[in-house]
Image: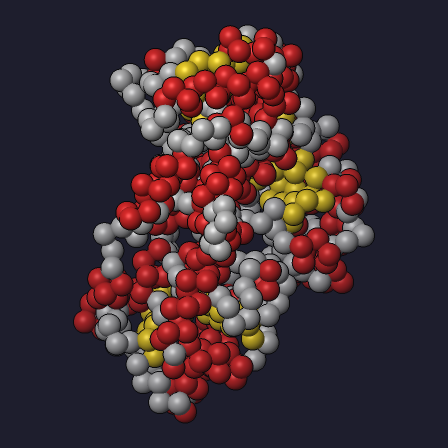
Amino acid sequence: MYRRCCKSFKMKSRCSNQIASKAEKRLRNTAFVSTRSICTLLTHSMQRNDANNFSLFLVQKLCIDQKFVVFTPKDGPMVKDFMSHGVDVVFCNIQADTYLDDLSEKLRFYNIGMVLANTIMQCDIVLLAKSINIPTIWMIHESWPRDKLEYYAQEVFLRKDISSEKIESAFKIAECVVFPSQMQMQLYHGLYRPEAAKTIYNGIPLVRLDQLSLGLTRNKVRESLGYKPTDFVALHIGTICARKGQIFTAKACAKLITEKQCNNLKVLMVGARYIRNHEIQYIGQITESIEKNNLDWKRWEEMAPCERGQYPFTLMDIQAEVTRFYMAADVVVVPSLNEVLPLVICEAMAFKKPVVCSNIDAIPEAVTDGVEGLLVAPGDPDSLADAILKVYDDPSLRIKMGEAGRRRVEHQFCYNGMCDRWQDLIDRFPHESTKSEKIKGKTVLVDMDNTIVDWDAEFIKRYSDGSSRHEEIESLIRNRSHFEIERNFPEPERKAVLEVVRQPGFYCSLQPIPGAIDALKEMLAEGVDVRLVTSPHPTCYASCASEKYKFVEKYLGPEFLPRLVIVRDKTYMFGDFLIDDKPHVTGSRRDPQWNHILFSQPYNADIEDKPRLSKWADWKRVVCQHCAK
């Protein structure tokens, strides 16, 4: 069935040829240290859009341990982004008659052991991978109506070769289909096998976004854009096209300016591109609607510096980095007609901006009406205008919604959590060697407090004993931001906090974290040299150490006692890995012999450059990922 497709991979340019040549040479001559299967991710382009941004976020995290090769039909600005993370980018001509035949050949040449197909339009890749026995994870970003699958593929995205029958066939045979929302899973229910479907919410890298905003202020960013501190800036980010609904933003805001005297309202639309005819025509419709209201607009790229911020409406081309626009905004508007769960909503909430969104698809899974923002009927500029006016008139509401949005992103759209779930999903497929072979003979050092034992639970129990503050204390400790327990309390309380820590019997009363004891025993059974490496608390050295011996004897037996090491400085310990909840384990040695695997706790959630273990059931997967280092 794949004979119909075209002639081999054609490189788009001399630069593309050079990139592919270097990639092929590296793969021919390098014996990969890692025994993990090489994974390919296929994209439709290298332009900046939600699907590609998601792919880049995922690769940034997983490429530490997972070799990736990206196949794409088109050059674009994101090529450099992927290559900066050591990911080879190979260009292929999707218009070639033998495209799929040659793709099959290339998958074998690059020794690909796993395919990540990206969007419904790669249904043909899913079918191809199945035919040559390569496992596939299919990422579905769309929420196309089931009776219009062919229309969207052929008319909107110009893939005349994709039929509804082909899409449905791919759903039936896909080993794993990942949806970024429950709404999507329900939308396509019946097309896929129930056991093949997973929901993984797309995460965003909060730490990276926070770092990008360092040194910037709202007024400084506004000044660079020409906006005054007193301007009310409505921001609409996304490729300017019909499904994103920019025309409703234009009509709603024009109404507010002309009828409600919101004269300081300024609209910034970021995402114009002049590639597809229907997008160019849509931009014309937007500007025409603005002019009908006797209002002015201009392209940012055509403005003189003195003109910036002077027009009620500014249209800006697609940008590589959009962080600064969020900082300048008072509200972020997302009146889409067809959208699953756009990253722009989560990014806006990360910057504590209220959002006004269409009440469609999976957006209500991220935004509760009246809490993080306001939900409006799609395609209704009057309702949209009313919602924008509500936040326009109430600065305190904007602050309240912004704070709620940040909390929701931290809870529901955690970047590390998303990547952990993706890595776990990838690891369910077979790789080149068994995990037991890779971990046998390794030395794993394991911390105790808040790693093996639930230290916080015992502290909460004792500190709140007989107090009416139990819920308050439990919430504070379970969400604490500081590793040292006393630093989470006001100065006057810290002495009482430390008194609890040195109470007799505190450490031998600790309870194991679920799965921890079984994991330690399983490590030994797998041939791992396990050492419990723990530091006594400085307020009670002697009692802390003796009680930890009692804990080990009680839960692991006397035969485990020789494996317990009480030590002040863990950097002197020799091993392959240290599993520890402390964000940064430091000591006299600057370069310890072990690799630090974080055991997840709230106070280390902001660290993204270290591997982490979130539950003991995953210990083997996490350790195996790093055995090749």
Residue located 34% across and 72% down the image: 233
- In terms of depth relative to the viewer, which is nearer, 47 or 549? 549
Total residue callouts:
0
592 horizontally vs 552: left or right: left
Question: Is 502 situated above or below 181?
Answer: above
Dividing the image into 4 quarters, which one contains the C terminus?
Answer: top left
Question: Is 475 situated above or below 152?
Answer: above
Residue located 62% across and 41% down the image: 117
- In terms of depth relative to the viewer, which is nearer, 169 or 368? 368
The quarter of the displayed image where residue 620 is located = top right
Dividing the image into 4 quarters, which one contains the N terminus?
Answer: top right
Residue located 33% across and 26% down the image: 538
- In terms of depth relative to the viewer, which is nearer, 238 or 223? 223
Outermost residue to the bottom: 259
The quarter of the displayed image where residue 327 is located = bottom left
Residue located 53% across and 18% down the image: 550
Report x, y in % for residue 518. Answer: 64, 23
Outermost residue to the left: 306
Question: Is 146 situated above or below 475?
Answer: below
Residue 127 visible in rendering: no
Report x, y in % for residue 432. Answer: 63, 18
Colour scheme shown = secondary structure
Residue 325 visible in rendering: yes
Report x, y in % for residue 213. Answer: 30, 52
Report x, y in % for residue 533. Answer: 44, 18
Question: Is 69 situated above or below 293?
Answer: above
